[in-house]
Image: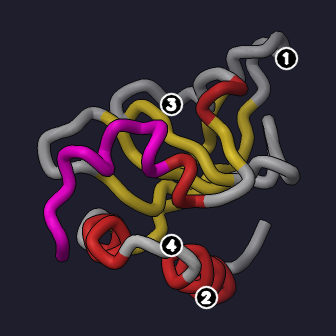
Amino acid sequence: MPAPDALIRLIAFEVGRIPDPTRREALRGLLIEPLLQHRGAEFGDSGARYPTWLIGRGEQASIGLAYSEFGYGPETPWGYVSISHLSLGTEAQWFSHLDDAFIASGLAGTAKPG
């Protein structure tokens, strides 16, 4: 699990690789100071909690963007999660790249450039 400074650099790298400048700026507008949470899994392991960084959230959405090397990672460490339910969600919510999680979350269609 990366330290906050390393995670911020990793987020910056992922954002910088987004080819569409409008989508890139929209994602930047949703980023927050990384917040460490411990989220449960939907895949068995009842009671298990996994360290997860909440890294972004929609203004009025109940969905946030997250990073976790546990659960469905490390191959797919970028995901979208419920803000109110401390769960990792399903495997379909986790991706290899932040941009993919941003698009799949639906937040890309509602975000305004930062």
Disc 2 versus disc 3: nearer the observer = 2
What residue does disc 4 label?
A: 18
Residue at image position (68%, 86%) is 6
Q: Position of residue 81 (x, y in %)?
A: 48, 36
Q: Position of residue 99 (x, y in %)?
A: 52, 59
Q: How is the image coloured?
A: secondary structure
> Is residue 95 left or right of 82 when viewed as pictured?
right
Magenta highlight range: 102-114
**Cβ–Cβ below 8 Å for labels 2 and 3?**
no
Residue 45 is tagged as 1
Q: The residue under label 1 is which amino acid type?
A: Asp
Q: CA distance from mark 3 to mark 1?
A: 15 Å
What residue does disc 2 label?
A: 9
Q: The residue under label 4 is which amino acid type?
A: Ile
Q: Is residue 17 magenta?
A: no
Q: For this rendering, which residue is in front, 112 or 57?
A: 112
Q: CA distance from mark 4 to mark 2?
A: 15 Å
Q: The residue under label 3 is which amino acid type?
A: Leu
What residue does disc 3 label?
A: 86
- Badge 4 crowding class, 10 Å Cα cut-off, few under 14, some 14 to 19, many 20 or more, is some
Residue 105 is tagged as none
Q: For this rendering, which residue is in front, 52 or 91?
A: 91
> Is residue 8 left or right of 41 when viewed as pictured?
left
**Cβ–Cβ below 8 Å for labels 4 and 1?**
no
Q: The residue under label 2 is which amino acid type?
A: Arg
Residue at image position (52%, 84%) is 16
Q: Quick one: SS at disc 3?
A: loop
Residue at image position (27%, 71%) is 22
> Is residue 12 left or right of 74 when viewed as pictured?
left
